[in-house]
Amino acid sequence: MKAFSPVFAILAGLFWGISGVFSNILHAYGLTSFQISGARGIVASVFLIMTVLIFKRRALFTDLKTLLLFIFGGLAIFGTSTCYFTSMRYVGVSTAVVLMYTAPVLVMAFSVIFLKEKLTPKKLMCLISMLLGCVLVSGIFSSGRFDPIGIIWGTASGICYAAYNIIAKIEASRGKDSLNASVYHFSVMGIAGIFLLDPPSFSKILSVSPLKISLLLIAVGLFTCVIPYMLFSLALKYLPVGTASALSITEPLSATVIAIVFLGEKATLISASGILMILIPCILLSLSKEETK
């Protein structure tokens, strides 16, 4: 299993990368980002709970300390997807996903500010590159879709994703089974989803095309939530968090290609330069000695 851990991280990124397509379709039906994230969490939690009840009931048991960790992990995932889906409504899929992938650099910045880690020249250069890249990707200097609200939501998704990476690594370092963690993560998402689903509005939208919308929601729950998060959890069991994050960089790349090919988003030289200025520092920081210890 350890030999396949890099493949798991790469595949996780590819599955996450298709979430923009589902989100655009569901938004077109009138669903909000909170409703999509909520339904996503409900589908994922129901599927996993049914799975463990049939095949591995012991995955339902945990201790109180780990339960609290699982709750924070679930909230981090929910926050990541909700902020990401909201951001793409304002600035498009390609910009939203790249902003979310500022997570490795954000982890570095938080470490310097709150954990008093040393700000090395390499870290400073990466931080400056990331900030400049965000400005270029935002579309403010081109014909792209610049919107401050979208940029804020995209950055928030990066913060939540950074938090999830840290929590997931703590879980893996404690020897927690990926299925055990995923059950609780998605159960938290499902509970949060119930409060944010807005049943009257959701039912009205669902009545427009019950079968199609239901199938789309099931697909977004399985293919952009259950499968990739379990693959990523498996990868984190054997890989440093920075390495796993770097390998899952296939998400912004695949999401950008999908957005251009299938969603009609335009790619400019400026935005492409911005993407590189964000992704390259992410990879360098993720694979640095400080991150892989």
Image (spheres, rainbow, N blue to C red):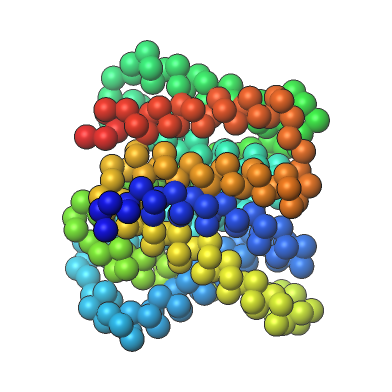
- x and y percentages locating residue 184 in the rendered image: 35, 68
Residue beneath the point at 46% across and 54% down: 11
Above or below, 240 relative to 12: above
| Number of dots carrying numbers | 0
Query: What residue do we see at 25% from left, 53% from top?
Result: 2
Q: Quadrant of residue 271?
A: top right
Who is closer to the viewer here, 1 or 111?
Answer: 1
Instruction: Point out the image quarter for the C terminus.
Output: top left
Where residue 30 appears, x then y in whole percent? 76, 66
Left or right: residue 248 compared with residue 114: right
Residue situated in front as seen by the camera: 53 or 2 = 2
User: Is 293 on the left or on the right of 220, as rendered?
Assistant: left
In this view of the protein, which residue sits in the foreground, 143 or 119?
143
Q: From this view, report whether residue 233 is shown above or below residue 195.
A: above
Q: Where is residue 275 in the image (x, y as percent from the top left)?
A: 60, 31
- Would residue 134 be seen by someone viewing this image from the given angle? no
Q: What residue is at 45 percent from the left and 22 percent from the top?
A: 126
In the image, residue 33 sits, relative to residue 61, either above or below, namely above
**Residue 224 x %, y %:** 53, 61
